[in-house]
């Protein structure tokens, strides 16, 4: 059992503290407010969770030192606008051995940092430099968690082992925890879904029905994903619990403050009156300016977010914003360009029509991390075996799940590098071992190629009517060898010149 400090005795901090205390952990729950601590410790009820009894075992405190010192886990559960100030107070009591779990959802307006980034930034100032920070996010209304209703959530951390520790900590008979390594994606989804929930609320406030709500959820997710991909997210979160999961719950539930706040805006309330009426933090309103800045910085079109921003700022009425959204320029759901789709179709048609004399299609599979001469040499020789070369690159999730292997470059980066090679005609993702048999038919493959380190391993594909070829590897080239060689070559007396400032570029 663990010693856990919870910072923030709001609805969520209290619900989590209760759950963990009932699971047998020792909990210290901190609040900045004296009244809150007094009321919780005397009544054992939270004003926003009236039907929930708060366990006697929880210690309540106004001392952030007591809440942080010697705890294995520290949960940051204050509203996003107080995360920095709270961590500034806490950082000198935190050490590298502790795991910090952020549950606040937002983006800091001035810095555009996510909440785990804000925490790291504060800790670096006078606390630990290498603290492990996990984002815990998903469709989790405190009102339901505090009634032990079934709930799922995602623990996201670059280091999967730490994410698994947090999974273990929170998993119980009512809560099922998943892990993810796309921290930025998970956090972005958690912050931006609140804006889409405001939109869904506005739509209900205007008297629109389920069709409009479904449209806002679907197109809202599309714009979150567009921004996320532009910001370098791995793409592992959008269709998961922190993405579509949290979006569905926040945009449809009666417990959602963002949805309620939107409803009041749709009914014609001023923003300040709507927020006052909700009476709790409305993170969608807090995060809006940051999202607008991000959409401008990364040049991503976010029409729903922009419309909500205009309503919140009073630049447009809710019905003007709705008219604008429905009357936007026509567009498509397709994500590939029509040119790409037509090209692929034409290639497939030609291959099918021209039979034996047609284009010969070759396929190869790999990770292609740190693309090097060995890779390019293999691709060049593979292409020489036919006319059209398809390269199937293993996704980050597949690498991790099946090979427990992490890449230097993300799937999207590795794909971009391989696509830039002139021998390569098409790059597609490898998501499972099983897809090979179907790929042979879907892509009308004639020849399957791998390096001879896999010799014999894919002979079974001959049953699918393809030729299986193992090409000799380029001698003495491997990604790990290159990393080792470069490290040795660059170091002089144990150091290497890495900074441009250290180089004299003037020939005199
Ligand atoms: N409520 C939920 O169901 C839920 C679920 C998942 C995530 N979250 C996220 O958790 C975070 C907290 O939400 P909540 O619902 O608990 O909020 P809340 O409105 O219930 O809590 C407000 C809390 O903020 C504290 N506070 C006020 N001023 C402060 C200051 N200057 N410094 C530190 N703390 C201060 C108050 O003491 C109070 O405890 C939000 O980011 C929210 O998005 C909430």
Image: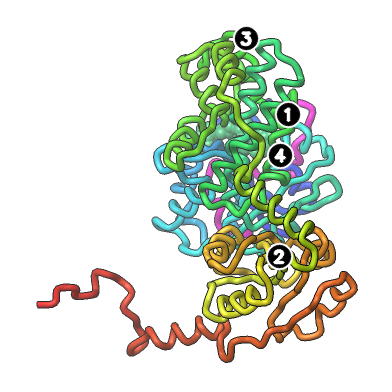
Task: Name the residue beneath numbered marker 2.
Answer: 359
Q: CA distance from mark 3 to mark 2?
A: 62 Å
- Please report whichever mark, 3 or 2, sits nearer to the chain's N-terminal start: 3
Give above or below for 476 relative to 205: below
Q: Residues within 10 Å of mark 2 (few under 14, many from 20)?
A: some
Q: Nearer the viewer, mark 1 or mark 2?
A: 2
Q: CA distance from mark 3 to mark 4?
A: 26 Å
Q: Secondary structure at mark 1?
A: loop
- Please report whichever mark, 4 or 2, sits nearer to the chain's N-terminal start: 4
**Region of the chain picked out in magenta, as a range:** 49-73
Task: Name the residue beneath numbered marker 1.
Answer: 49
Nearest the camera: 272 or 222? 222
Q: Secondary structure at mark 3?
A: loop
Q: Residues within 10 Å of mark 3 (few under 14, many from 20)?
A: some
Residue beneath the point at 33% across and 90% down: 493
Q: Is mark 4 within 8 Å of ligand 1?
A: no
């Amino acid at each position: 059992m663990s010693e856990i400090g919870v910072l923030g005795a709001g609805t969520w901090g209290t619900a989590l503290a209760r759950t963990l205390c009932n699971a047998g952990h020792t909990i210290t729950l901190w609040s900045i407010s004296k009244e809150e601590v007094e009321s919780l410790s005397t009544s054992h009820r939270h004003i926003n969770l009236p039907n929930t009894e708060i366990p006697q075992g929880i210690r309540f405190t106004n001392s952030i030192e007591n809440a942080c010192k010697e705890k294995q886990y520290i949960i940051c559960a204050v509203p996003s606008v107080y995360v920095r100030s709270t961590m500034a107070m806490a950082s000198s009591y935190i050490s590298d051995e502790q795991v910090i779990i952020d549950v606040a959802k937002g983006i800091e307006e001035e810095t555009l940092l996510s909440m785990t980034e804000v925490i790291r930034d504060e800790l670096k100032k006078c606390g630990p430099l290498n603290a492990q920070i996990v984002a815990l996010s998903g469709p989790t209304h405190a009102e339901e968690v505090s009634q032990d209703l079934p709930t799922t959530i995602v623990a996201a951390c670059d280091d999967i082992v730490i994410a698994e520790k947090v999974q273990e900590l929170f998993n119980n008979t009512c809560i099922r925890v998943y892990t993810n390594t796309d921290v930025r994606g998970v956090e972005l989804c958690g912050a931006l879904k609140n804006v889409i929930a405001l939109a869904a609320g506005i739509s209900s406030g205007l008297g629109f029905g389920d069709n409009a709500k479904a449209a806002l959820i679907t197109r809202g997710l599309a714009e979150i994903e567009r921004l996320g991909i532009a910001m370098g997210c791995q793409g592992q979160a959008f269709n998961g619990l922190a993405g579509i999961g949290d979006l569905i719950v926040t945009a449809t539930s009666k417990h959602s403050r963002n949805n309620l706040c939107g409803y009041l805006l749709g009914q014609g309330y001023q923003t300040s009156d709507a927020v006052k009426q909700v009476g709790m933090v409305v993170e969608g309103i807090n995060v809006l300016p940051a999202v607008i800045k991000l959409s401008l910085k990364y040049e991503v079109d976010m029409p729903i977010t922009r419309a909500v921003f205009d309503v919140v700022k009073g630049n447009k009425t809710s019905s003007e914003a709705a008219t604008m959204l429905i009357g936007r320029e026509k567009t498509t759901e397709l994500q590939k360009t029509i040119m790409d789709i037509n090209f692929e179709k034409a290639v497939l048609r030609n291959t099918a029509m021209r039979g034996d004399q047609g284009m010969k299609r070759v396929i190869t599979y790999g990770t292609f991390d740190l693309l090097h001469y060995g890779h390019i040499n293999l691709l060049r020789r593979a292409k020489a075996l036919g006319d059209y070369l398809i390269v199937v690159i293993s996704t980050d999730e597949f690498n991790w799940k099946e090979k427990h292997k992490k890449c230097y470059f993300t799937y999207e980066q590795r794909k971009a590098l391989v696509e830039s090679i002139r021998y390569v005609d098409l790059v597609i993702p490898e998501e499972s071992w099983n897809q090979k048999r179907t790929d042979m038919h879907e892509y009308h493959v004639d020849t399957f190629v791998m390096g001879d380190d896999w010799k014999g391993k894919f002979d079974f594909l001959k049953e699918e009517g393809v030729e299986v070829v193992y090409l000799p590897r380029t001698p003495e080239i491997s990604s790990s060898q290159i990393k080792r060689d470069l490290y040795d070559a660059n170091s002089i007396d144990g150091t290497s010149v890495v900074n441009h400032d250290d180089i004299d570029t003037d020939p005199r």
